[in-house]
Image (cartoon, rainbow, N blue to C red):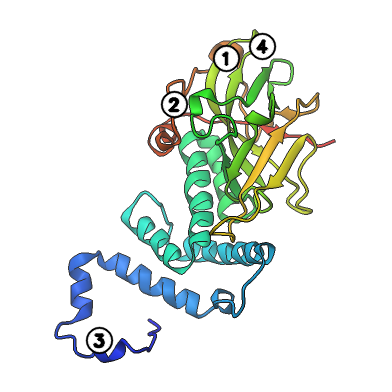
Amino acid sequence: MTELKNELDVYRKKCTFDVKELKKLVEDEEVTRMKEKFWDYLAADPIFSKPKHRMDPHALRKLNFIRALRMTHFDSLDYKIHLADVLGLNYIICCQLFDGSLAVKLGVWVGFFRSSVFGLGSDEQRADILPRIYANEIKGCVAMTEVGHGTNVKQLQTRATYDVESEGFYIHSPDFSAAKCWVGNLAWSSTHAALYAQLILPNGVCEGVHAFLIPVRDPTTGAAYPGLTIGDMGDKEGMNGLDNGFIMFKTIGSPGLLSSPAFLPSLPQENIPPLLKTLTSASVLTYTLIHRSMVCAWVRMG
């Protein structure tokens, strides 16, 4: 492990016990090995060098995006990190110690978004989508918080109306208060979003909040797809390496948000489950949504 020499070295040399033996007492050996490998991984790649001057937010977000991609290589090649276990928690803590923006960005990619697909998707959906996430073909965010309701999930206004003919959904933001806001990774780096919206049946009955997997921008050009308004929340007091964004949905006529055999099974009206009706705050996401089912929709361009 790369050692940093500074004025504390004098006092470290006065230590009367073996620091490595102490580590064994306070943390798992696998965690210790991961931490050592983590810092060596960063030290060996110049992209993780600290900037010598203050960077503007756009340049900082671009740098953080590249760093996050590098860290997904560390993740997938060396450890199948799961943020719910001790190893994953310590992995994020290491990222936080290096840069808070990097920790949150990876927390959304590796944690919220990937876990949404893993925990809410069907076996078929997981088999199709997760490999594309691991390969960085899909980079995601979680679009839940709204201007008018914050994280009071039960009162979300974004609507997903089921269309019998296309077996798909029309996503609509009724007004500005329904805009999804402060979505980490959305402003310019995500290709997809796990969207939480009220499921409306053709007869007008609301079945409560459901999760939808939707593409939000062209992976080649980075442009938002038609019918979507995506913007940047702007500079913040801290963590400007994270691109927090907002998104609004126009009512899209056919073809709009349509089902795709790769993502969405046929959902007869009578078989759509009334999920997530009791959600009242974002804190329930990790503990409740992970056990529910995910409805996935696909945007067809043209």
- How packed is label 3: few (under 14 Cα within 10 Å), some, or many (20 or more)? few
Q: Which label's residue is closer to the chain start, 3 or 4?
A: 3
In 3D space, how far apart are the residues under numbered discs 4 and 1 (Cα atoms)?
A: 9 Å
Above or below: residue 170 compared with residue 119: above
Q: Which residue is mark 2?
A: 279
- How packed is label 4: few (under 14 Cα within 10 Å), some, or many (20 or more)? few
Residue farthest to the top? 203
Q: Which label's residue is closer to the chain start, 1 or 2?
A: 1
- The spot of residue 92 in percent (x, y) is 42, 59
Residue 169 left/right relative to 147? right
In 3D space, how far apart are the residues under numbered discs 1 and 3 (Cα atoms)?
A: 63 Å
Q: Give me the disc on residue 202.
A: 4
At mark 4, the secondary structure is loop
Q: Which residue is mark 3?
A: 12
Kind of residue sitting beneath label 1: Cys
Kind of residue sitting beneath label 4: Pro
Q: Which residue is mark 1?
A: 206
Above or below: residue 35 compared with residue 198: below
- How packed is label 1: few (under 14 Cα within 10 Å), some, or many (20 or more)? some
